[in-house]
Image (cartoon, grey):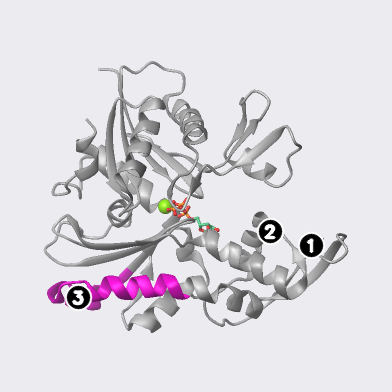
Amino acid sequence: MFTRDIGVDLGTANTLVCVKGKGIIMREPSVVAYDVRNDAVRAVGTEAKEMIGRTPGSIIAVRPLKDGVIADFDVTTAMLKRFVSRALKGSFFSRVRMVICIPVGITEVESRAVYDAAKQAGATDIDLIEEPMAAAVGAGLPVSDASGSMVVDIGGGTSEMAVISLGDIVTAQSVRIGGDDLDEAIIGYIRKKHNLLIGERTAEIIKIQIGSAKPYEGESEIEIKGRNLVDGLPKNVTITSKEVRSAMADPIEQIIDAIRITLEKTPPELSADIIDKGITLTGGGALLRGFAELVAEETGIPVSVALNPLDCVVLGTAKRLENNNGFENYVFRRGKRFR
Ligand SMILES: Nc1ncnc2c1ncn2[C@@H]1O[C@H](COP(=O)(O)OP(=O)(O)OP(=O)(O)O)[C@@H](O)[C@H]1O
Ligand SMILES: [Mg+2]
């Protein structure tokens, strides 16, 4: 029959889409630019992200998800529709099966919103999978074994950690702190310390270029441009990697605290497995310089970063679509309820 199977990682920072048989077909920032006069969508994804902070009054560039959940339903739906239509490529499909991820520990209303957005974007059958489960499968962890695997996914809006055994989550924790909060911490620091106002795009560039969780060899600095808060004029300032690290220390500590709490809640047999096998990091935040080392130091457990950490979640949905590999025992708690 004319069925298309698609997997979606609807993230606060990035949305990725895969199609069964084709692999990942799209990686785009979760951003929409629209015309306020008639609500018409002007651009989505990378093109819209370039517009953030640079739009005239008639156009607004927004990120419709915040802290891992939908903040603006209509805009999220419009974005998802565009992305799904790329996956369908103008062909007609009588059924569109969609596997889409949600953070762990979100409310019924929040997961219902994801379900409804998927439906409005054209999906006829929908499975909701918790993000760390998808991340673990996508990272290639042996989730079906009778042995504990631990995954920590650091996204833009949330950090989620889970211990998985026999194909399902044993214990999980989610904090609404992620890469966006690191950016915000940098903005706050530069405003306070240097009287300089910078945008979120600039803050993210600073974080990626010189940011770190631990001191590193070849520490450097970066010259940034922003608006002087004293006289309102454009101004240049040089920021060191050490300053950036201290600016981000608070949110990083909160993420590590959540990892500790997850470990504390883990049954002892599984803790022993995790001590042997280590923790696997996924999500864009796993790429922060020195973060894996810091987590290892603070927990005393070996830590590794998954291959292509930004792709793990959507690769997990792809496994569900291909042969259900890894999800044989997973209970689709939330998805079923809405059928
Ligand atoms: N090299 C890097 N160093 C530090 N941070 C990075 C790097 N690359 C990407 N990031 C950060 O990773 C985050 C995006 O990660 P990801 O795409 O996994 O999030 P998401 O899935 O959209 O969000 P969520 O899962 O919270 O909904 C952004 O905050 C981005 O700035
Ligand atoms: Mg994510």
* Residue denoted by label 3: 271
**Mark 1 → mark 3, Cα distance in angstroms:** 47 Å
What's under tag 2, amino acid-wise? Thr
Left or right? Give the position of 218 relative to 112: right
What's under tag 1, amino acid-wise? Lys
Name the residue rendered at 40%, 32% in the picture.
Answer: 117
Q: Is residue 91 magenta?
A: no
**Mark 1 → mark 2, Cα distance in angstroms:** 9 Å
User: Is 140 situated above or below 292?
Assistant: above
Mark 1 within 8 Å of ligand 1, using the beta carbon: no
Q: Earlier in the sequence, mark 3 or mark 2?
A: 2
Mark 3 within 8 Å of ligand 1, using the beta carbon: no
Name the residue rendered at 23%, 66% in the picture.
Answer: 149
> Is there any visible trace of residue 23 in the rendered image?
no
* Residue denoted by label 1: 225
> Is there any visible trace of residue 177 in the rendered image?
yes
Name the residue rendered at 44%, 72% in the picture.
Answer: 254
> Residue 202, which numbered label?
2
| Residue 126 placement (x, y as % from top left) | 28, 33
